[in-house]
């Protein structure tokens, strides 16, 4: 009988914390740098930015867009039909993670995939045969608690909204104005490329 590895919990937790921290920091920097640049462009017309700021804006635009695309691509499974198995519980003590056992909607699955990539424990896991029969071992949850799922969904949605709003305003300025700073122009076209990729991942057009 195989034994479960004992040293996986802490490294996995550290990995999740680092992933969540880095992606959230990247989103905040993206919103701060691009947001400030957008406000200055709207108010001043064609302000000047340092080469470092231009490179940072392009890098953050590509990074945040890549995270959204990869997160949507990851969310291809179901997140609503997975049961939570209580330790050493009989089958009658199996509780659903969501109120409905219907397959998850496309939007919920995609944003759960993004949340999982950000670092939340919401992978689309499948229960083991022993867990399905109510014989799961202690410390073997097969999905996240509903409260965690809700927080994860809101964080993923906020992440996407920041990415989308900043990018679409930058693109609008690049298209509608004859002269815009290089920072805005580069960020706008990088965003356009990533949002097309994210759209393919969201609607599973590559499947």
Image (cartoon, grey):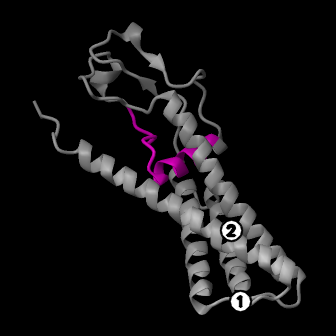
Give how far across and how far down residue 43 sits, in percent: 86, 78
Taking 73 as reference, is 98 above or below it? above
Give the labeled residue for mark 1. 182
- Magenta region, residue range: 108-126
Between the residue at mark 1 and the residue at mark 2, the CA separation in whole angstroms equals: 21 Å
Q: Which secondary structure, mark 1? A: helix
Q: Is residue 152 visible?
A: yes
Q: Assess whether residue 118 is covered by the magenta stretch.
A: yes
Which mark, by number, is residue 196?
2
Query: Image point 49% across, 60% down: which residue?
Result: 23
In the figure, is residue 68 to the left or right of 134?
Answer: right
The percent coordinates of residue 186 (x first, y second) are: 68, 84
Q: Which of marks 1 and 2 is nearer the N terminus?
A: 1
Alpha-carbon neighbours of circle 2 within 10 Å: few (<14), some, or many (≥20)? few
> Is 26 on the left or on the right of 161, as rendered?
left
- Image quadrant in which the N terminus is located: top left
* Direction left: furthest residue: 1
Q: Is residue 38 above or below residue 95?
A: below
Seen from the viewer's position, the closer of residues 173 and 86 is: 173
In the picture, residue 189 is in which quadrant? Answer: bottom right
């Amino acid at each position: 009988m195989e034994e479960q590895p004992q040293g996986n919990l802490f490294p996995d937790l550290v990995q999740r914390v680092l992933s969540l921290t880095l992606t959230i920091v990247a989103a905040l920097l993206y919103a701060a740098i691009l947001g400030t640049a957008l406000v200055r462009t709207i108010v001043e017309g064609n302000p000047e930015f340092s080469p470092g700021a231009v490179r940072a804006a392009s890098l953050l635009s590509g990074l945040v867009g890549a995270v959204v695309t990869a997160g949507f691509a990851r969310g291809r499974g179901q997140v609503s039909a997975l049961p939570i198995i209580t330790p050493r519980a009989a089958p009658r003590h199996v509780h659903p993670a969501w109120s409905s056992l219907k397959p998850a909607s496309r939007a919920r699955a995609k944003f759960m995939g993004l949340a999982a990539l950000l670092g939340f424990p919401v992978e689309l896991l499948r229960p083991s045969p022993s867990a399905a029969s109510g014989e799961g071992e202690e410390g073997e949850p097969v999905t996240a608690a509903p409260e965690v799922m809700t927080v994860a969904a809101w964080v993923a949605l906020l992440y996407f909204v920041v990415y989308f709003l900043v990018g679409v305003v930058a693109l609008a300025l690049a298209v509608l104005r004859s002269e815009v700073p290089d920072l805005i122009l580069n960020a706008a076209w990088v965003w356009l490329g990533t949002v097309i990729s994210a759209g393919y991942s969201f609607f599973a057009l590559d499947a």
